[in-house]
Amino acid sequence: MSDSGIVHVIGAGLAGLAAAVRLTEAGRRVALYEQAPQAGGRCRSFHDPALGRSIDNGNHMVLSGNRTLLDYARKTGGADALKELRPAAFPFLDLRDGRTWTLRPGGLWLFDPGRRVPGSRPLDYLAALRCLTAGRHHSVADRLPTSGPLFEPLWRPLAVSALNGPVERISARLFGAVLRETLLRGEAACRPVLAPRGLSDAFVDPALACLRTAGAALHLGARVDGLTVEHDRITSFSAGGSAVSLSPADSMILATPAWVAERLLPGLTVPPPGPAIVNLHIQLDGPAGLPGGLPFVGLVGGMAEWLFLRDDLLSVTISDADALANLPAEEIAGRLWAEIAPHLRPAPRLGATIPPFRVVKERRATPDQSSDSVARRPETRTRWSNLMLAGDWTETGLPATLEAAVRSGNRAAQATLSNGNNPIRRSRVFPAFTSFRHRPIWTDGGAVLARPGPEGQSKKRG
Ligand SMILES: Cc1cc2nc3c(=O)[nH]c(=O)nc-3n(C[C@H](O)[C@H](O)[C@H](O)COP(=O)(O)OP(=O)(O)OC[C@H]3O[C@@H](n4cnc5c(N)ncnc54)[C@H](O)[C@@H]3O)c2cc1C
């Protein structure tokens, strides 16, 4: 192993995991600290005792155009737990009148009425290009014709679910980035990629296994606090109540959510928290089908926005859902069930009570993604020479998504590696600045301080 020090990665969401994996690949010693008893952060599965099965904290829509995320899954072995739907297709259902259509992007799709939104013309789609040239302060509603035939059936649902906020607020530039990385790159970049066995099986557990094999020290249930800064370096912190000192060769990647990073490093500029995302998981009596015949369907004209089906587990997702999240779980479930039940195949008996369910309210599901908030995203490198930032809230040019999280983690790892090779940056690290007052908790090779509890981490229920 090299003498280039330990990289302390704080936070085991996808940003922290991706950074840790990249660093161990490069032969660096890594210690990963996660405050929750399980890794994954905002992308995780957990056992739900009421339903008697594993569920995800929320449905995650991944597309084949999320190249960095899928590379990470391939590299860690998680890709075996993913299923790509080919050819790309997005079924939609209008909850008001039961009308269905399927968007089938790719090739000359715009010239085939059967592959477009009913009533739309090819020219209507070109309006989306205005998001690619949007100014820094434009919202999605500023750039797209809100009265056009595509706004309600297509642009609004896509933008609200990709950026978790109202169209009058969320950044048109970020929505432009989604279009650039998916729809504009053709069918091969638009295929939905699902995780039929759950998010952790695909994106979390394989990465942890790779890190253990590589000898990384995994500290789950170890909340990091009390960063000490001396001159331009982080010199110590506390993890799970124990003090950790950084040697001159050590560095840190802070991959917590933005609001935690701001608390740990007063003066850091970060975007404020954004709205909640609410998920309702329903355990059906048996296998069912969705309109459109695929394992998911987009919904317009109601409260529910996306419906996913995994065998007999039906899940409903609503983004930008602060108001909904304030209601009791029973009320949320009752309202959503009344909307969707008539459209299931086979349809439940009229007036049938809702089957067993679980509501998961993820408050602050993403950072706020208005233009003003996006301008507050920090870069990977900081003014502290041995500290890099990672997370979906850092400057990636993308909405706060899994793709952004993994890209940010890779960038932070890369910046850390090039720091080690850069004599100018290294020469700024003086041993005299380093405090060895604290008892280190470094444990060699894959030590796990605490194992996940039976119910997973702080799931937020109504
Ligand atoms: C319900 C829901 C639905 C979503 N849907 C989609 C989707 O369809 N598609 C998509 O691409 N993205 C989606 N997202 C967004 C995606 O989940 C996030 O962008 C991504 O998971 C963020 O990863 P991260 O590593 O940046 O942050 P996090 O996952 O938040 O990871 C940060 C980690 O730091 C830990 N931590 C916090 N404080 C400390 C501390 N003091 N010490 C140690 N550890 C600490 C946290 O516990 C957490 O594990 C969704 C998010 C939610 C909540």
Image (spheres, rainbow, N blue to C red):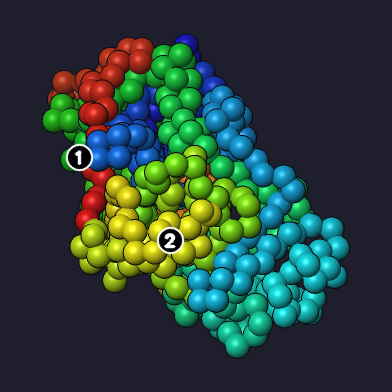
- Name the residue: 43% across, 56% down: 348
Q: Amino acid at mark 2?
A: Ala
- Left or right of 178 on screen, residue 270: left
Q: Residue 335 at what x, y percent from top left?
A: 33, 67
* Camera-nearest residue between 120 and 376: 120
**CA distance separating discs 2 and 1:** 46 Å
Question: In which quadrant of the rendered view does residue 73 lie?
Answer: top right
Q: Residue 285 at what x, y percent from top left?
A: 39, 44
Q: Are marks 2 and 1 in contact (CB under 8 Å)?
A: no
Question: In which quadrant of the rendered view does residue 215 lie?
Answer: top left
- Left or right of 197 on screen, residue 455: left
In the rendered view, tell whether residue 327 sits above or below residue 79: below
Pick out the residue farthest to the front.
Answer: 349
Ligand 1 within 8 Å of disc 1? The answer is yes
- Left or right of 222 on screen, residue 216: right
Question: Quadrant location of the C terminus?
Answer: bottom left
Q: How many numbered badges does the structure rendering display?
A: 2
In the rendered view, tell whether residue 65 sits above or below residue 217: below
Q: Amino acid at mark 1?
A: Asp
- Name the residue: 75% across, 59% down: 105
Report helix, strand or loop for mark 2.
Answer: helix
Residue 200 visible in the displayed image: yes
Q: Residue 424 at what x, y percent from top left?
A: 50, 36
- Left or right of 316 on screen, residue 26: right
Q: Earlier in the sequence, mark 2 or mark 1?
A: 1
Residue identified by numbered label 1: 225
Report helix, strand or loop for mark 1.
Answer: strand
Report the disc number at residue 182: none
Report the disc number at residue 341: 2
- Name the residue: 35% across, 15% down: 446
* Camera-nearest residue between 5 and 423: 5
